[in-house]
Image (spheres, coloured by chain):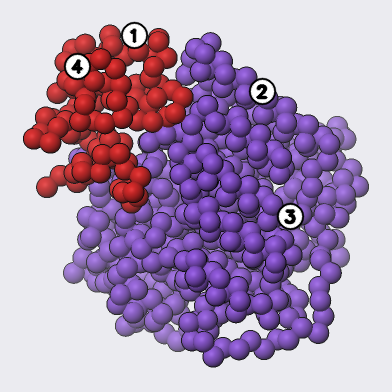
Chain colours: A red, B purple
Amino acid sequence: MKLLTGNDLASGDVIWWTGKGWSRHIGEAVDVGDEGDAILAREEQARRVNVAYIVDAEQTDSGPLPNHIKERIRASGPTVRTDLAINADIPIVRA
Amino acid sequence: MYLYDSYDQAMVDARVEEFRDQARRRLAGELTEDQFKPLRLMNGLYLQLHAYMLRVAVPYGTLSSRKMRMLAHIARKYDRGYGHFTTRQNIQYNWIKLEDAPDILADLATVEMHAIQTSGNCIRNISSDQYAGVAADEITDPRPWAELLRQWSSFHPEFTYLPRKFKICVIASANDRAAMRLHDIGLELVERDGRIGARVFAGGGMGRTPMVAPEIRDFVEEDELVSYLEACLRVYNRYGRRDNKFKARIKILVHELGVEEYRRQVEEEFAHMRQLGIQPPTEELDRIRAYFAPPVYETGLPEEVDRSDPDFALWLDRNVLPHKQPGYAIVNISLKPVGGIPGDASADQIDLMADLAERHSLDQLRVTHAQNIVLPYVKKADLYTIWQQLDAAGLGTANLDRISDMIACPGLDYCSLANARSIPVAQKIARRFAGNGKEEAIGELKLKISGCINACGHHHAGHIGILGVDRKGTENYQLLLGGSGAEDCSLGAITGPGFTEDGVVDAIERATDLYLAQRQEGERFLDTYRRLGMAPFKEAIYG
């Protein structure tokens, strides 16, 4: 599956495309299929997201999980400050 | 400490208002990210893995209590209650909102601080010896020179768009505590025939192509130093490669031209610069120097310190260094608690350090390139009370220059450039060596970790270095041995195949076990490595 992600322009928060808008919780992200570029162009134009891009992910029992560790850490928050994590239950290192 | 004059303050204030308008236009959609990015970077505002990150300049690592308290205020009000002290003696905040950034810069400006020269292809914040002004081995205080160069380089129109970033370091001791030769230009102040001048080294650096800077001039008179540096920069600005980011640093130019040819071109430009008469008047250096005049020390202070508390005695032995003034000491506050995050300090800890500096260190603090804090003017009689307060706040770790006193970059936990996490590795190493009791036996060992080839964690200069890489989507760690950023500067060599996170901790323990078994009297880990060479270490590490 493919997810859209970027940063909120004003706050800088990591955000994910939900199909209706943007969320800080990757669990609400949806597969954008082939529509990613079109959504990105529209959303960047509307200044609702900054530096957005498409990432590969897989659907797991607990929700979408990005393939690359960098994106998993973006989705989770710093692994060394779990008190600041947004989605602390995301597995960072694959089993 | 240098205090702004009306010109300094006006420049910084104007910059804040300029950025306020730029940020407003970005938020209003009048600027695209491509247009805004270079503007925010010129004000130290990056976009990192989780949020915007603001890097605040601490010129040559020198802070007053008032400035330190402002850093705590920013952590508390605008960030998430902490900051991260960096290898360029700066501080950065990881959770900044763009909409807050102008107000943060305005707050900083009220205490003569800013985020200028902490990003972009300009001359970056000038670094120096954290013990400047108090070290017994220095020939003069290097900070007036660093301040002169700060003023010369700030907004220098000719050097605002260099081929790449440019880092300058000034020291005044034969003992290099600032990794001077791993800078684009390193200056070592020396005395010759009763006159102060500078040895100049050019073309050092770490990153993907590490190089130790060669000496390009053995003495530049102090009244010609700015002109000479201007010549160095002009040659680089003219011929440095702009076609390839990875070959754009001055080290590549010096390497490709050869030291002799680079030196010849600099001398030619220097001869021209002399004719222009743009060297600042010596009165300007004298004016700056007055701000760094030695304080009025108390005399007749006691030298003896009660060592009856064993934990205090350990801290005394490890973290407190001799001062050039009798009765005083230099206190190193470790920001490397076992299991902690190297370089991080909470707002409360920052405030405490500011309070201690105000009460016990003539209102001054220093940030070290090893991500610690220094109280440079402490009476020996005050050491115990200082240690008690530090210890109670989690700042009393006694590990200066030991294996757990690691330099570590933020790595993949925070940095968008990183390939692997640095901090968890640092934490595991610290816990391993705290748990097995070997840290004390090993003694001085400088371990440095970078989460990518850009080497912000100085892995090339570690007695033991660790480089995190991405191996098919998995974090992997290469091990290097034999580096040093000190006066015996050298670059570490890769041992061989990389390791997992746990594997690299095991490998380090095997390397240090070999050292403990093979060392001769007085040898540090680095000395034993240099005597024995890589082969036995490789054998011990890989079996």
Between B359 and B167, the one nearer to me in the picture: B359
Between B451 and B39, the one nearer to me in the picture: B39
Between B105 and B501, the one nearer to me in the picture: B105
Spatial CA span between label 2 and label 3: 29 Å
Mark 1, secondary structure of its residue? helix
Q: Are marks 2 and 3 on the same chain?
A: yes
Return the residue at label 2: B18
Residues marked 3 and 4 touching at CB (< 8 Å):
no
Spatial CA span between label 1 and label 2: 29 Å
Between B448 and B198, the one nearer to me in the picture: B448
* Three-letter amino acid code of the residue under disc 1: Arg
Q: Are marks 1 and 2 on the same chain?
A: no
Mark 3, secondary structure of its residue? helix
Mark 2, secondary structure of its residue? helix
Q: Picture quarter containing residue B235?
A: top right
* Three-letter amino acid code of the residue under disc 2: Glu
Q: Are marks 4 and 1 on the same chain?
A: yes
Spatial CA span between label 4 and label 1: 14 Å
Return the residue at label 1: A42
Residue A91 is situated, as x and y percent measured from the top left of the image, at 18, 44
Label 1: few (<14), some (14–19) or many (≥20) C-alpha neighbours in 10 Å: few
* Three-letter amino acid code of the residue under disc 3: Arg
Q: Earlier in the sequence, mark 4 or mark 1?
A: 4
Label 4: few (<14), some (14–19) or many (≥20) C-alpha neighbours in 10 Å: some
Q: Is residue B467 left or right of residue B164?
A: left
Q: Earlier in the sequence, mark 2 or mark 3?
A: 2
Residues marked 1 and 2 touching at CB (< 8 Å):
no
Return the residue at label 3: B143
Return the residue at label 4: A32
Spatial CA span between label 1 and label 3: 52 Å
The answer for which chain carries disc 3 is B
